[in-house]
Image (cartoon, helix red, strand yellow):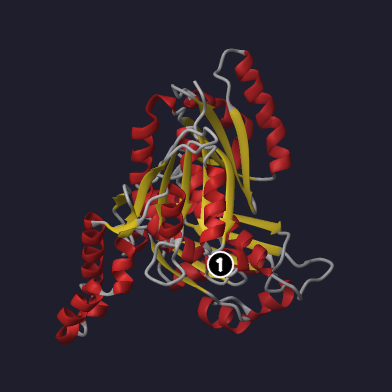
Amino acid sequence: MTEIVAHLLTVGDELLTGDVVDTNTAELAQLCRSLGILVERAVSVRDQPREIADALDRARRADLCLVTGGLGPTSDDRTAEAIAAAAGVPLVLDPEAERLVRAAVARMAARPAALSHRSMAADRLRQLATSPENLKQAWLPTGARPIVNESGTAPGFHLRLPPTERGNSETRVISTPGVPSELRAMLPAIAELLRGWFGGRLRPVSRRVYRTFGRESVLAPVVEQRVASAIDRGAPPVALHYRACGPEVLIILERTGAGGGLEQFDGIMGEALASSLYGIGAADLPTRLVRVLREHGLWLAAAEACSGGGLGQQLVAVPGASRCVRGALVPYDDAVKVELLGVERDLLHRHGAVSAEVAAAMAEGVRRRLVADIGLAITGIAGPGGGTADKPVGTVDLAVSADFGRRYRRVTLPGDRAAVQHGATLWGLKLLWDLLVESERARVFDLALPSGSALE
């Protein structure tokens, strides 16, 4: 059985000037990987029909070409034109695509911002729905079928590129808008199309994600030795991948083809990773913390100096955080630590703002101030200045305080100011998790995101 081969094509001048970071290629590559489709080539081109056509010509040697960008209402949106030329067909006003565009414009006009001008809404809606700019989005290559776009006005579409004189087989093309949120909303429909077209030729990939804190260079040798031993004893062959993001390392097991069976590695990975492992599955640490805090009816308050509110932001991004997060204060100046949190001036004078003693006092102070069950504090030197021989740039002191326990940690983080702040945030979350595990209020568990994830 031959492997399905795909080319990925992202279109837009802004991708090649550095004004916009291309995330669409990653989204599409992850979708292909999950279905067992080999991505042979990924390329970005300008909004120029000739460049798009050249990329499509190379894609004819593949089974599939996934294209994003260049489907909007402006004059530089020319992807549909280029795909039509590659297919050797004209553009036509597609009735279903026109209906979708009109419906999308109506949805936009019904939003609160548009309805605030209700007196002109009806006239404006008619103008928008019939304007040449918006109807341009309904002109598709002859024979193309539209794909619904619930998040924007431009529908996607799919069609076949016929074989060429060189003897290539036909290539399926799917074209979507380039706005990342619009592409993301269309991924389930794209996946359904791919399953329908390629059916039994697909070789889906099963994945098991182990979420850890530590150094990849330390964790990898232990994990690889344990996994190799398990395979020698009869466990299914798997591939190992690592994804490091600051102090957090995702260790991913993959198995291609029918059957899963990756759960049997949980015990092996648990022994190999020990306390470095905090979870299994797609859900990240903030999601797990919110779940555990809510399950136990616990309220958290945070005092963040060098992290500048990053920890609070990560937690409140999780749905349901309003029932377990009191708030996060940013007592950056020492005077605010004294006045708002009750940290003693003498403590600051003797030990300095970046110290175990001050971190502990901040955790206690914010717990009292915001009437919470748990107080968490982060104080450090984010740089680029402010470091000393004893406390170099990147030094971060963290403390967590509750009636059922206290924990403290000092870490020295590499990188620039943003990297130190991000690392401090993650270590703060990990310290809280460790306290909850130690008190048997949390455990390592398999948790998938409700909406699914590319990691699953």
Q: Is residue 157 left or right of residue 170?
A: left
| Front one among 94 and 266 | 94
In the image, residue 122 sits, relative to residue 77, either above or below, namely below
Q: Is residue 387 left or right of residue 38?
A: right
In the image, residue 140 sits, relative to residue 122, either above or below, namely above
Residue 155's image quarter? bottom left
In the image, residue 314 sits, relative to residue 146, either above or below, namely below
Q: Is residue 35 left or right of residue 188?
A: right
* Relative image position of residue 124 (x, y in whole percent): 21, 81
Residue hosting label 1 = 13
* Relative image position of residue 356 (x, y in whole percent): 67, 63
Give the residue type at disc 1. Asp
For the residue carrying disc 1, how many other residues have a C-alpha within 10 Å: few (<14), some (14-19), or many (20+)? Answer: some
Residue 93's image quarter? bottom left
| Front one among 277 and 442 | 277
| Front one among 243 and 168 | 168
Element at label 1: helix
Q: Residue at x 26, y 71 (%)?
A: 108
Count up the numbered dots. Answer: 1
Visible residue check, residue 411: yes
Visible residue check, residue 155: no
Q: Which residue is drawn at 64% across and 67% down?
A: 418
* Relative image position of residue 9 (x, y in whole percent): 52, 51
Q: Which residue is drawn at 40% across and 62% down?
A: 71
Q: Which residue is drawn at 32% across and 51% down?
A: 142
Residue situated furthest front in the rendering: 165
| Quadrant in which the C terminus appears | top left
